[in-house]
Structures are given as structure tokens and as C-alpha cells.
Amino acid sequence: MSTTAITAPACATMPKVFQHPLLEDGTVTGAEARKQQNLLIRRAERACAACPLMADCLYTAVVDHDVAGFVAGTTQRQRAEIRARLGVRVAAQDLDTLAGVTTPNRQIDHEEVIRLRNANPYESLDSIARRLGCSLSTVKRHLRKARAADAPEPTATLQSVRPSVEQVLQAHRDVVERSNRRERSAA
């Protein structure tokens, strides 16, 4: 019997890269912060490209779940563009229900999270979480919930059949290539 070593994906072993506040989809101000963000993105892209789970991770992040941050070699904006190209609509996850937080006496007030974000649009989500005394994932969850409430209802023109893995990978290549061209022309 042969034994196969199971290794964790890079996103799990490189939290200082994949969970860095600069990989959030916020506006980065300042040349030094943009430079650091680009370095983090390139490092994360290389790690994702080498991961044997890349195709499955990308498919899940595009078709099944509206996840935040940098996932499967893509930013949240790139995944939204991939979904738009494929006509995919993903419902925002109600993580409160999944986590069993359904009581009206929640520790963090949803409106306070939204108010703080609107009042401080350039502040990192991590900083907002520290102000509220909660986790970064809690802030992200509340912001996703607010986006979902503002999102228009799906239209009949959206694709009713799930795209294939190859369709998602092709859309990914197109979107990432286009993003890279825009970056190079801006530099």
C-alpha cells in the first residue's frame, strides 16, 4: 500500500498573504500601498496557479459561493466579472444562519458596521473590525448581507444551466488577461 502525502493548499499555509488587508477589494491609496498590494497579488496568484485544487476552488468561488477576498487566483471584482460573462448569479451566503447566530440579540449591530464602513470608506475592513471588537469575517459578513439587500433581483436573461469547469476557466483566463493588460497600460 502506497501512502500519499496530503499537503494543505497555499491559501491555508500562507495566511499572511491571503488574509492580508491589502487583498481586500477596497480602494488602496498611496503608491507604496499599491506596490505592496501588487506584490501580494502576484505572490498569491503564483501560489494559486501551482495549486492542484485551483480549478475546483475557482469553480466553487464563481458558481457556488460569493466569497470575499482573494480566492483561486482572482479578486472579488474579477470573480464578479467572470460571473457576468457567464450569466451566473450567486446568492450571498447567510453565514449568520449557517453559524447558528439567529437570535435578535446579536453582539454586533449590522447598521453600525454599515455606518462605520460608509463613514470610513478608505479604512481597512480589519481596522473596522478592531473598532467594533469583532472579527474581520464578521465585518465581511455584514457587508455581504448589505450588498445582497441592495442587489437587483435576477433577471430571466441569466444562464439557467450551470457553466462547465472549462467555461469558468476560459472566462477566468480572459478576465485576468484583461486585468493584467489594464495594469500594464496604467503603469
Image: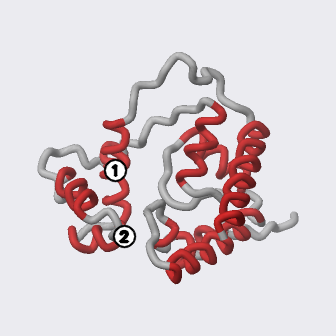
Give the residue drawn at x 24%, y 54%: 114
Give the image's coloring scheme: secondary structure
Image position of 57 (left or right of 69): right
Give the residue drawn at x 75%, y 37%: 167
Percent of width and height locating residue 8: 66, 68
Inspect this view and state whether residue 13 appears: no
Percent of width and height locating residue 108: 19, 58
- Disc 1 secondary structure class: helix
Give above or below for 166 relative to 105: above
Tag 1: Cα neighbours inside 10 Å, few (<14), some, or many (≥20)? few
Residue extending farthest to the top is: 156
Q: Tell me the amino acid under the disc marked 1.
A: Ala
Quick one: 41 or 120, which is closer to the camera?
A: 120
Q: Earlier in the sequence, mark 2 or mark 1?
A: 1
Marks 2 and 1, how far apart in space?
Answer: 24 Å
Residue extending farthest to the left is: 105
Q: Residue 21: which numbered mark, if any?
A: none
Residue 160, image quadrant: top right
Residue extending farthest to the bottom is: 32
Give the residue drawn at x 87%, y 64%: 1
Contact check, label 2 and label 1, Cβ < 8 Å: no
Give above or below for 61 relative to 160: below
Query: Which residue in the protein does label 2 denote?
Result: 124
Q: Residue 99: which numbered mark, if any?
A: 1
- Disc 2 secondary structure class: loop
Inspect this view and state whether residue 184 appears: yes
